[in-house]
Amino acid sequence: MTSHAESDPFPQASTGRRPIELLGGPPEETLIRIGAFMEARAAPPYRTEQVRAWVFDRRIRTFEEATNLPKELRAALDREFSLTPLEPAHVARSRDGTVKHLWRLADDEQIESVLIPTSDRLTLCLSSQAGCALGCTFCATGHFGFRRQLSGAEISAQFRDASRFAESEWQRPVDRIVYMGMGEPLANLEAVQVSLDVLHRGFGVGARRITISTVGLVPGILTLASRPEQFGLAVSLHAPDHELRASLMPIERRHPLPELLEAIREYASLRGRRITFEYTLIQDVNDRPGQARRLAGLVRGLPAFVNLIPFNPIPFVDWRPSSAERMAAFARTLQERGVQAALRTPRGRDIAAACGQLRLEAREPAA
Ligand code: SF4
């Protein structure tokens, strides 16, 4: 049986050669390839810059859209290169303005991205894997298991296609990107790193506007720490001690809290960025006053901000979100101990926008 991880998202072209994905590598290499393609056809060098501008500034999905290029050149580009267009399988609109896209990939796998508009920003939540193998007990994606890794081009194309939607629908650019959708980004590190290059140096999204959210894969955190950019890092904690965390998130057994916190400390000091901790409050599971005190002790001394998110019930477990009083008391306990924390209002619940369930939270404070 062929595993989904091994399946090929891009079947061979009829020529027997696979088109090169323009969003599938560092933008500088992409430009060299386009330059070589133009040179081989004796096309003037300025055509390379025209193609770059169409791909990254105008965000085309097909070469047909590149109207200032000769028709034959567009056809040749189409044979040689792929723009990895995503097919929108479904668009769900929440009453609160959140929009979830379900994208169908070339091999029929489906992934989600979510646009979250607030008064001052438009955030896009991207998926990095189809499904997820890490099996967090509270997570719908985790319950469905792993399908396959996304390519760097498939991750980047979510940004291109969702931002086209946002611009035509709301005349607003996407100004924040969070890797917080389906999958664990640091379990697909190679493709995620490619997509970071494409988003940042290709599409020109500022590094400080991009956040990678992880359940705590230490090697991946250290790899990101060694990059020069100041990407944001968000870490899902959900429990202040080893036993409880291991029962909620199997990753805790592989990278226990002390090791995780050490890596986070390194990230914060090398990159000079405050770390966001995600903590979902589940009634009588992780929301007691003593647990708030332990959490404060854990993150004190780190440049940290704690997002407190009410649990979003899923069919697989019998938990409830914490009461408003418990949540407020939990936040107060953190704040009294000098830890910055805020209660977050989940967005798009009527369209099940939280594909990672515990990890997608609104950036607007609760009333
Ligand atoms: S919370 Fe994230 S890492 Fe855990 S199972 Fe869900 S998608 Fe995977």
Image: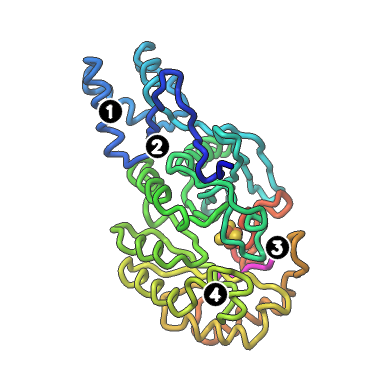
Residue ID for mark 1: 49
| Residue 359 visible within the image | no
Mark 4–mark 1 Cα distance, whole angstroms, equals 46 Å
List the residue tagged with mark 4: 341
Dot 3 and dot 1 residues touching (CB under 8 Å) = no
Please state which amino acid type lies under the numbered disc 1. Glu
| 311 in magenta | yes
Mark 2–mark 1 Cα distance, whole angstroms, equals 16 Å
Q: Position of residue 323 (x, y in %)?
A: 74, 75
Residue 311 placement: quadrant: bottom right
The residue to which callout 2 is attached is 23
In the image, is the residue at mark 4 within 8 Å of ligand 1 by its beta carbon?
A: no
Q: Which of marks 3 and 1 is nearer the N terminus?
A: 1
The residue stretch that appears in magenta:
307-312
User: Which mark, by number, is residue 64?
Assistant: none
Image quarter (top left, top right, bottom left or bottom right) of the C terminus: bottom right
What type of secondary structure mainly makes up the magenta span? strand
Local secondary structure at mark 3: loop
Local crowd at mark 2 within 10 Å, few (<14), some, or many (≥20)? Answer: many
